[in-house]
Amino acid sequence: MIRTEALRAFVTVTEHGNIRDAAEILCRTQSAVSMTLKQLEAELGGPLFESDRKSKLTDLGTFVLDVVGPLLRDHDRALELITGYARGYSGRLRIAAVPSVAALILPAILKTFVEARPEAEIDLYDTDSASVREMLLRGDTDLGLASPAAEPDGLRAIPLFTDALVFVCNSAHPLAAETRPLAWHQLSGERLILNETLSALSTPEFKTLAARARLSVRNLTSLLAMVQADAGDTILPGLATRALPDGVVTRPLADAACLRRVSLLVRDGRTPSPVAAAFIDMLCDALPDMAQRFGLREPWS
């Protein structure tokens, strides 16, 4: 049976025109390469070179080179692609994240990631937590960075950080001048604009306030525009209020339970692809610095 190693030795000798240089490339002795060529010729039933100098091919040698050369190159390229994929250096990675994470946490991490893995292809989607979870369950994304569902939903959640919620209002609002954290009773008469983040809040005082709301906006840009226009007030994670439009301010809430929990979400029972696993490692390594920079709270992993 003809071995791939023997064909590679033959091709390498033809490329360099002598056994000595080929032996160095193959990390073998000259005698070992010479013996391999003799065995290959014996198996093929004819000489591959016109002389012992290995500088000119026979008709058989030319045919073998024409056939084997491209196949070996394809073989090597296939191994290179497989190895790169297995080590997370290539492949396609789809990430769905809530807008604040996509805009503030991911840019620096993705910059480092794509520089280290130029063959990887990244698709980033920014949307609310409910949509992130839906995309994962449909198989439309590989990883999610969002708040987990309150009930089991077929996704596995790895806690990353918590983010304090804040009251967001027009700068002309009377509460904009308040210096102390706001209690729920101070918001009892507010025109609250609901958003998807608030679906995780179960505080009775908030439920009472939310029951009177008549406006709900899922897009962050539109939501802030509504507050800017004094159409109402809202409650958002602090990370989502880093770049507010003119005329919009935030005030802290007194209720320490008012937190957004952000997790890494993956489909339960599915092993992440190598490139996804590599991204997860980089994300978790970067989170402590990001937490300090943006005032986020534990846990992160």
Image (tube, rainbow, N blue to C red):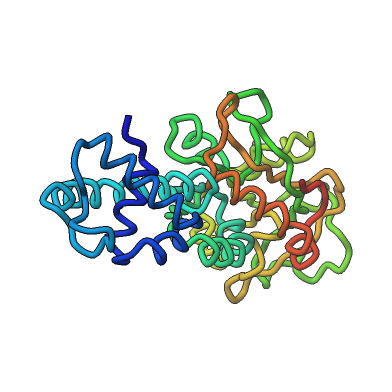
Left or right of 10, for residue 297: right
Relative image position of residue 183 (x, y in whole percent): 85, 51
Q: Residue at x 66, y 64 (%)?
A: 241
Relative image position of residue 37 (x, y in whole percent): 33, 47
Residue farthest to the left?
59
Frontmost residue, 104 versus 62:
62
Left or right of 245, for residue 165: right
Frontmost residue, 176 versus 166:
166
Q: Residue at x 55, y 63 (%)?
A: 116
Q: Residue at x 73, y 47 (%)?
A: 160
- Quadrant where the N terminus sits is top left
Q: Is residue 218 visible?
A: yes
Frontmost residue, 40 versus 224:
40
Q: Residue at x 75, y 53 (%)?
A: 163
Q: Is residue 215 visible?
A: no
Relative image position of residue 146 (x, y in whole percent): 62, 44
